[in-house]
Amino acid sequence: MRQVYPGGSALTDAVLAALYDYPDLGPPPARWLRANMVASLDGAATADGRSGGLSGEADRQVFAMLRAHADVILVGAGTARAERYAPVRPESEGVRWAWLRDGRPPSPPIAVVTRELDLDLDSALIAGTFPHARTIIITTSSAMPGRRDAAAARNADVIVAGEASVDMKAAVDALAERGLQRISCEGGPHLLAQLADAGLLDELCLTISPLVAGPGADRIVTGGLAMPGGHTLPFRLVHVLEDESYLLCRYVRPSSWLAVGAEPAELPQDVAEVEADRLFKLLVGARLRVPVGPPADELGGVPEPPALHVVVAHLDYPLRAQRDER
């Protein structure tokens, strides 16, 4: 496996793991929600009904490494059934990345989102959990109380978030309050749509498989939900890895990095510039009488007090007339 953007070099395990470090988070309710998905060249999220049909060896290793990084794995009930989910077994899964769990339990728990709690409560995912990583079931108050009690009796932890449908913000907040702040979502497409719709998706790790799946399969986001405000969600490319024609891409939302207090040097390339440009446009669009001046070096190194100085890389024609507005 090699990194092709930015730069171009082979990767050791330590360097590869560092490329996927979570940002530093404060105490709960601070959290970071990363989604890890795979798609074919023609946009399919599955082949023969399962995402595993699109995966390759490098993708499987990054998948295991992302699990080792995470405090909890979030998955929809449909994907858990289709992919035959079971508790992560540290003695046989992700052994290569076991060192990333130093100081934490040997494996993360799996949190399953299910509106009606229509799960097989005798499955390995529910009944075969480990004491350090009990499966978490996120459901609704409309789910039958008897089912919730039965799940708890089989060693599952139950979180009720929402009434008729799962309130995803309440769900991820509840995970963070338990100390499970680094959340890795493994799909499926309907759950990813709910997270994106709620504005909760901070990062997307997307593997592009060198396969054409043909018509019929869902995209990685599906379900007919609109994005927040009816708009698209902007992400920024952080890196691209390549192995045997698979491309492993990491994208982050610029606003998410800034929300957790990341320093400009830690941000993906040009994020600070993009956010400054967006701020300036918002100020102008709101018609606020905000003092805006040129950078200090254009004033002989002495800023104009008192003033808010917004440094913008691209002062195009609609904004130029506003530059000296008082």
Image (cartoon, grey):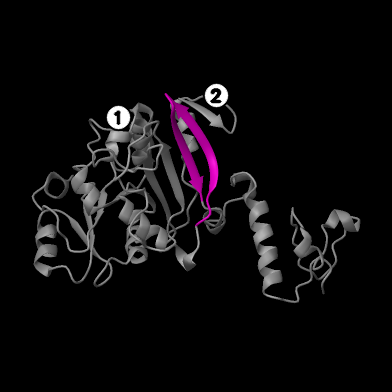
| Residue bearing mark 1 | 95
Which residue range is magenta in the image?
Answer: 233-252
Query: Extreme right residue here?
Result: 300
Tell me, yes or no, whether the highlighted magenta stretch contains residue 68: no
- Mark 2, secondary structure of its residue: strand
Compared with residue 289, is residue 212 higher up or lower down, i.e. above or below?
above
**On the image, which quarter does residue 319 sit in?**
bottom right
Pointer 1 and pointer 2: residues touching (CB < 8 Å)? Answer: no
Residue 134 in the image: state x and y as whole percent.
21, 50
Q: Position of residue 234 (x, y in %)?
A: 53, 54
Residue identifier under label 2: 9
Residue 247 forms part of the magenta stretch: yes
Q: Is residue 102 visible?
A: no
The quarter of the image holding the C terminus is: bottom right
Please state the horizontal and vertical placement of residue 37, each as a whole percent of the image: 37, 43
Mark 2, Cα crowd under 10 Å, few <14 / some 14-19 / many 20+, is: few
Please state which of the two labelled residues, at mark 1 or mark 2, is closer to the viewer.
2
Q: Secondary structure at mark 1?
A: helix
The main secondary structure of the magenta stretch is strand
Which label sits on residue 145?
none
Residue found at x 15% / y 50%: 126
Q: CA gap, disc 1 to disc 2? A: 24 Å
Q: Quadrant of the N terminus?
A: top left
How many marks the image carries: the answer is 2
Percent x, y of residue 166? 28, 65
Viewed as shown, does residue 110 lie left or right of 62? left
Q: For the residue marked with disc 2, what is the amino acid? A: Ser
Is residue 185 visible in the rendered image? The answer is: yes
Q: Residue at x 60, y 29 (%)?
A: 7
- Could you tell whether 33 is left or right of 75 in the image? right
